[in-house]
Amino acid sequence: MFNCDYHIHTRLSPCAARDFDLEKIIKVQQERGVKEIGVTDHDYAYGYKAKNIEAVRKIVQKCESPIPIHFGVESHILEYRVASINIQLASYFDYVLMAPNHYHLRGVALPSDLGNPKRVANHELYMFEAAIACPLTDAIAHPFVLTPNVFRLSNEEVSAFGSEMMRHIDQKRLIHQLDLASQREIAIEISPKFIRYNQRHLTEFYQLCLEREVKLLIGSDAHKAEELGELSELEPILEELGVQEEHLWRPKEWRW
Ligand SMILES: [Zn+2]
Ligand SMILES: [Zn+2]
């Protein structure tokens, strides 16, 4: 429908499939009719070294692809005012996806009680606020999408837990953050991950984003070829939400 995918990992990310390289991504996306993509490996995949980022950036730029490829990165919030990337490294990328809830990674602040939906709600909101406050953030990756493994829940259980968590989110604080995001043109990602993890209740949150004029970033968060196709599962939801081209986030070009 919108033919773009701005959150794709390559084999450079340790959590991605070993055969998931640029050539494969381009081939699959071209077959699917995707018109524009962005690769977004985790910042730690570069060992936080500028020369590694620069080397990959050159490969992406030189790559003869029929589809335009943007060179983004996925970073994460550790705690308020602490992000995994700094401005010097961020400057090598076209955009930064900031994940507020990478709880599986070392150093990321965890909710005080993973079994308590109210505590998790407070913590998710705190991390979301931290991601919005970070000056490097272009878009927030998978906010409020709970990963079953982290919470040691099945997909069914995480659905009920997540829905209960969202009921405890302070709406006033959330709306204030969305208004800040809108002013600063920070996008909120909508990814098929929320369908994979059975968290359809988040549709209401995406609706709220649109009401507050926050742009949505479409990304598969694919770590292997098969996951690129999951993006089509978003189509009925985007339609239900009434998403039009003007509601979508697109990487910005700098003009000098
Ligand atoms: Zn992520
Ligand atoms: Zn990702």
Image (cartoon, grey):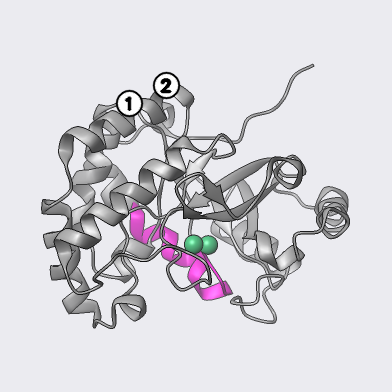
Rendered view: 16 above or below 101: below
Q: Residues within 10 Å of mark 1 (few under 14, many from 20)?
A: some
Instruction: Write the start and end of the magenta stretch as one range.
Output: 221-234
Position in image of residue 65 (x %, y %): 78, 52
Which of the 4 image quarters holds residue 138? top right
Q: Residue at x 42, y 62 (%)?
A: 109
How many labels were placed on the picture? 2
Quarter of the image where the N terminus is located: top left
Q: Is residue 21 left or right of residue 95?
A: right
Q: Residue at x 74, y 39 (%)?
A: 91
Residue type pointed to by label 2: Gln
Provide the secondary structure element on which disc 2 rests: helix
Q: Residue at x 30, y 70 (%)?
A: 197
CB under 8 Å between discs 1 and 2: yes
State the separation of the CA atoms marked 1 and 2. Answer: 6 Å
Whether the magenta-drawn stretch holds residue 247 is answered as no
Residue type pointed to by label 1: Asp
Instruction: Find disc 1 in the rendering and name its residue.
Output: 179
Provide the secondary structure element on which disc 1 rests: helix
Position in image of residue 93 (x %, y %): 72, 44
Q: Is residue 149 left or right of residue 161?
A: right
Task: Please say whether residue 242 is visible from this viewpoint.
Answer: no
Position in image of residue 220 (x %, y %): 48, 59
Whether the magenta-drawn stretch holds residue 224 is answered as yes
Q: Residue at x 25, y 38 (%)?
A: 174
Instruction: Find disc 2 in the rendering and name its residue.
Output: 183
Q: Nearer the viewer, residue 127 or 140?
A: 127
